[in-house]
Image: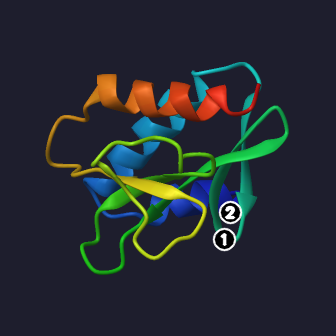
Amino acid sequence: MTQIEEFYDSQPEPNRSCFLFLKQFILNQSELMEEKWKWKLPFFYYNKKPFCYLWVNKKTKLPYVCFVKSLHIDRPELLLEGRKQMKAYTIDPNQDINIDLLTFIIKESLSKFD
């Protein structure tokens, strides 16, 4: 079992299912997207450049996606939370994911790679 697989397997439900969905959703955004293990977490690269990563908020225990090139995206759902370069989108795994918003954030972030 790889470190990436261990990460997903070690997550309690419903976070595990949420992370597995996010993984597939992110990978499906582009054939140039790939998943790697970096900084002890799943990190996604677009065209060999860091794009986003998955993690869990230490206080709330909710999963989030942190986008590398997201400072320009002005959405209240994206939070800096002490970061200087990246914003995070927190997801409540007990509710439906806002696919339209997630798609918008991904497309806006990808636009900064062109």
Three-letter code for the amino acid on which mark 1 is drawn: Lys
Toward the viewer: 46 or 94? Answer: 46
Asked if 16 appears above or below 10 in the picture, the reply is above
Q: Secondary structure at mark 2?
A: helix
Three-letter code for the amino acid on which mark 2 is drawn: Gln
| Residue indicated by mark 2 | 3
Residue 36 appears at what percent x and percent y?
A: 74, 50
- What residue appears at the point 68 percent right and 63 percent down from the top-left corner? 3
| Residue indicated by mark 1 | 40
Residue 51 appears at what percent x and percent y?
A: 67, 44
* First along the sequence among labels 2 and 1: 2
Residue 46 appears at what percent x and percent y?
A: 74, 35
Residue 39 appears at what percent x and percent y?
A: 70, 71
Contact, mark 2 vs mark 1 (Cβ under 8 Å) = yes
- What residue appears at the point 21 percent right and 52 percent down from the top-left corner? 92
Marks 2 and 1, how far apart at CA: 8 Å
* Left or right: 31 as drawn, with respect to 42: right
